[in-house]
Image: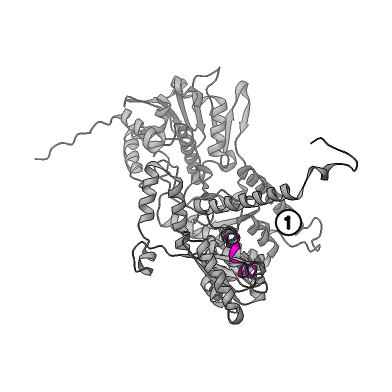
Amino acid sequence: MTLPSQPFQVNLHAVVELLSTHIYSRPSVFLRELIQNARDAIMTSIEQGTLAPDDALIRITPVGPESSELVVTDNGAGMYREDMAELLSTVGQSSKRDIFDLPRTDRLGQFGIGLLSCFMVSDEIIVETRPAAGGEASRWVGRSDGTFTLEPLDGTSGAGIKVGTRVRLTPRPESRELTMYARVWELATLYAEFLPVTLEVCGPRGTERFVNRTPFFTRHLSPSVLPPETGTLEEGSIEDLHAWALERDLEHLAEYGAELLGAPPLDMIDISVPETGTRGTAFVLPASPSPGAKQTTRAYMGGLLVSESVPDLLPEWAFFVRVVLDSTGLTPTASRENFVNDEALAVTKRAIASSLRAWILSLAENDPRGLQRFLAIHDLALRSLAVHDAELARIVLPHFTFETNQGRMLVSEIVAANPRVRYAETTEEFRQLAGVIPSDQIVVNAGYVYEKDLMRMLGEALPSASANPITLGDVIAQFGAVLGADAEGAERVRALAETALFGLDCDVQVRAFTPEDVPALYVVDPNVLRSMELKRLEESTSGFWGDLMREVTAAPSPEQASENSEPGLPTLATLVLNWNSSLVKMLAGIDTDDQVVASRTLRLMYVQAMLAGHNPLRPADRAILNESLSDMLALSTNLMRRDISVEDFLEPGDGHES
């Protein structure tokens, strides 16, 4: 026995709530859905040959003093009453497919959730239509309680219904503002300014305004399409007119880019993906974006806005452009506010990345000045791309600048000076090295983001060059030992320094190195430097956070545990005194009675060396600095008391009272 099937009831209120809270981002999208349906109906008529493209028209009449209804009219294909009878069930079927991101059909009659979106602003939807292929008019009235009526419009009742479709909405009080002229014009411009169908918004007192503008960003335009200025084009020739038209279109495109970015774009890059029917333009930002900024894409589908900010269409390194595109082959999601993440989208993303990369390569090979202008603003973006692209690195790496001990230099200049490039892997190590590297040698600071990776790629990108890291240990190992007659004096200074710096976790060596005006070099391993910073935080923090910092500093790092036989024993920093410095040699000759002066001098040299290396000062180090300044002040005050008298400030012959 076969049981009869029964239809189940759909809670339309719940469906509308689902639309407004989980599918659509805002109620205003109802107007976009109505424009989309009207556009689809018109395109169907054009395909069937019943409507000429130039005659296609969508008209929107907002709510105003003369009408309490919003009316959207098109002169497209219209519908038969049989289609209207199936409209409600089509809504249910279509919305179910859309919710699960299955393909939406763009054929007329599949209103789907597009029509349901109108219930977000109105409790009643009236659809009046007459088919273009001939037949009587019909009226369908749907209500938010789930009921609907359908009636033929013949005779006088249907006389005012022209070929096409008219949708009428009476907004709820809280939604009235969305259906009035100012807001409707704003929304129509936002969603449909590049629609290939004429869209008219009827204003107050019968005025009319057309929304449409030309989508120059889809016309495969970029400065490279202009012919060279050879002066050979005959004025008024077809070639001359073509060049003039291209130049005019480029001006319009640049104006749109300035409107989009808030300033004229640095350049414009054509985007074309024939496989997915995607065309557009990437506008190069005229200023560097904030750190961590991620650019989004403004996307249209058939001229109708999908979203002002589609995420993840651009590669992560492409934060230097803002892309605007139109597609006919990508699949929209249920809300039509994004694209389904399918193979077509993946193809489009790869093609966009390839276009941006090709532009950079062309710039490097054909326009070095343009590349330098680009690097002056978007250096970081290009470095991040070059790290993952060996071919690009080969072309652009010579144009990058790096900090060196001789100032900022181009990689090409560094390699020209010495193809065997040496670099410090951390900024802290570079700062310590910079003061003791001979002036005829170059050391690169590769401590900033991406720079160490780029240095490692130097040999691959430029076969004639090589790059190797250099450490403080390498440099100190090259410092000369103090031998012969000077050895005793050097040992005396070392012993004085160890006594003066007792308790500061600092070892002392005396070596001979250049330059001679550097009396001391403070050398510290990066791991020790981090420990010093943690110790400084511990000493300056109290309460819960102070206890936490003490627990952190009490636990040895893996490096310390492996290098020291006793767990937790700190690795000492080293103060390297320069025997070539006249100040250090003077300390060797100080009498035993003046050892206090020697101690204070060595402690001041210690702090000076720390500051020269940009190392953090702990409380004990700051105490030494304050102590030294106090000594200077006391000494200066004592000299004034001893050497200067009141008579020095009197004119000859003047007297004063005792």
In the picture as drawn, the residue positioned furthest to the front comes out as 658
631 and 474: which is toward the camera: 631
Which element is circle 1 on?
helix
Viewer-proximal residue among 341 and 525 = 525
**Would residue 208 appear left or right of 41 to someone viewing this image?**
right
Residue farthest to the top? 65
- Give the percent coordinates (x, y) of residue 181: 56, 25
The image shows a total of numbered marks equal to 1
Q: Kindly identify which residue carries mark 1.
A: 243
Q: Main secondary structure of the magenta part?
A: helix
Q: Is residue 123 above or below residue 196?
A: above
Q: At which x and y percent is residue 542?
A: 41, 43
In reply to whether residue 78 is colored magenta, the answer given is no
Quadrant including the N terminus: top left
Asked whether, in this view, residue 146 is left or right of residue 193, the answer is left
Quarter of the image with the C terminus in it: top right
**Would you place residue 499 above or below residue 129 in this image?**
below
Closer to the camera in the image, 285 or 548: 548
| Residue 113 visible here | yes
Is there any visible trace of residue 481 in the rendered image?
no
* Residue 168 left/right relative to 65: left
Task: Give the quadrant of residue 595.
Answer: bottom right
Q: Which residues are magenta?
A: 583-597
Q: Position of residue 102 (x, y in %)?
A: 35, 47
Q: Amino acid at mark 1?
A: Ala
Asked if the magenta segment contains residue 591, the reply would be yes
Q: Quadrant of residue 221?
A: bottom right
Lateral position of residue 606 relative to residue 93, left or right: right
Foreground pick, 229 / 601: 601
